[in-house]
Image (cartoon, rainbow, N blue to C red):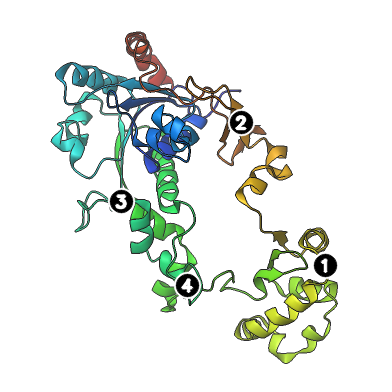
Amino acid sequence: MPDRPLDGVRVLDLTNVLAGPYCTYHLALLGAEVLKIEMPGRGDLARQLGPDPALNRARLGASFLAQNAGKKSVELDLKEPADRAVFTELVEHADVLVENYRAGVMDRLGLGWAQLRPLNPRLVYCAITGFGQSGPLSQAPAYDQIIQGLSGMMSVTGTPDTAPQRVGFPVADTVGGLSAALAVVAALAGRRGAYLDVSMLEASMSAMGWAVSNYVVSGAEPQPMGDQNATAAPSGTFETADGPLNIAANRQEQFETLCRLVDRPGLLTDPRFAERESRKEHREALNEALNEALRARPAAEWERILPAAGVPAARILTVPQAVESPQLAGRGFFTELQPPDGVDRRLKVSGSGVLIDGEQLRPVSPPPTLGEHNEELPALLRRWRTSSVAENAAR
């Protein structure tokens, strides 16, 4: 691949499971050299997580494979003097360090920001935690589910009868990881050292957008609405002849086009549906009328007809269907890699969702086995020692 924005940037990755590894995976996709520091014989907990017991036993669990391609792995025990010495030398020549230990763990090891900054004043130190380094919850353990609950996210997920419900994937972890990656890139652009305190709780509430702002600005407490969009009607999931269909006719002209295409012109003259706010007020009656009309055709047919006329609509896919979609294939979102030793199947990993100059960001190597690059560490250190001054001056 052509030069990438973070080519030459060196990242020490002390992270585990998802939020931290997801952050450093995006840094690797952007071109950074990511060196994953793992506990000898154990490694990232995600190596043992996933639906395949054989991969978990090989310490190459599917959860690990998903966001560690393009990285290198070395085993260092930061409590052992010899390994600490190697680590601190790596810090001297690194650009970024990312860790997601509980607040204070690195300080107690003598390897926190205060101890490392004198070794490398230009170091960008990024600490990802559930709640941040301060506040009454800073020492509390946190996983994605805990953050989803405390952020209010679960309270608005589901229907009035089923809420609170967990979002179906670890969204708090991934949002936290993306926020951290953005902060790291911003600090690198600033060309100075920085300490980045990333809170998954705060990142998640920021990402909730209108659900939070409608309350803090207008005092409107959001309610769970299932598959309906609170901001407009008709906007949500509807019934067709053979399955569900999402429609988001959020603008007046889209609503008018929808009524024409489903052969329900009478909806346009019904005073209940004449304006945006009245449609929201009478959402159930409007949805009932539209469902009756939409049942005349299968979802795939409506998916062809409605968007062609400017009405956003699409089927609801399963994950396997989404993975195989022509849209993702057309943009080369997934990359097939040579699997690491211990993986006996095709390995496909996702991209970042960003093309740079028309090129998909792809990992340059498969996820590493535990300690795969231990023997390369002396050579890596020599390279970092001899080139870091000139390269960083150029950056």
**Residue density around tag 3, few if under 14, some if 14–19, many if 20 or more, within 10 Å:** many
Q: Secondary structure at mark 1?
A: loop
Amino acid type at mark 3: Gly
Q: Secondary structure at mark 4?
A: loop
Q: Residue 325 occupies which quadrant of the picture?
A: top right
Q: Earlier in the sequence, mark 1 or mark 2?
A: 1
Could you give the CA–CA distance between mark 4 and mark 1, rounded to whole angstroms? 30 Å
Residue under pointer 1? 297
Q: Earlier in the sequence, mark 4 or mark 1?
A: 4
Residue under pointer 4? 162
Could you give the CA–CA distance between mark 2 and mark 4, rounded to whole angstroms? 38 Å
Residue under pointer 3? 130
Q: Is 156 left, or right, of 118 in this rendering?
A: right
Q: Secondary structure at mark 2?
A: strand
Amino acid type at mark 1: Arg
Could you give the CA–CA distance between mark 4 and mark 3, rounded to whole angstroms? 26 Å
Residue 308 circle label: none
The answer to whether the residues at label 2 and label 4 have Cβ atoms under 8 Å apart is no
Q: Secondary structure at mark 3?
A: loop
Q: Residue at x 38, y 12 (%)?
A: 387
Q: Earlier in the sequence, mark 2 or mark 3?
A: 3
Could you give the CA–CA distance between mark 1 and mark 2, rounded to whole angstroms? 36 Å
Q: Residue at x 62, y 83 (%)?
A: 277
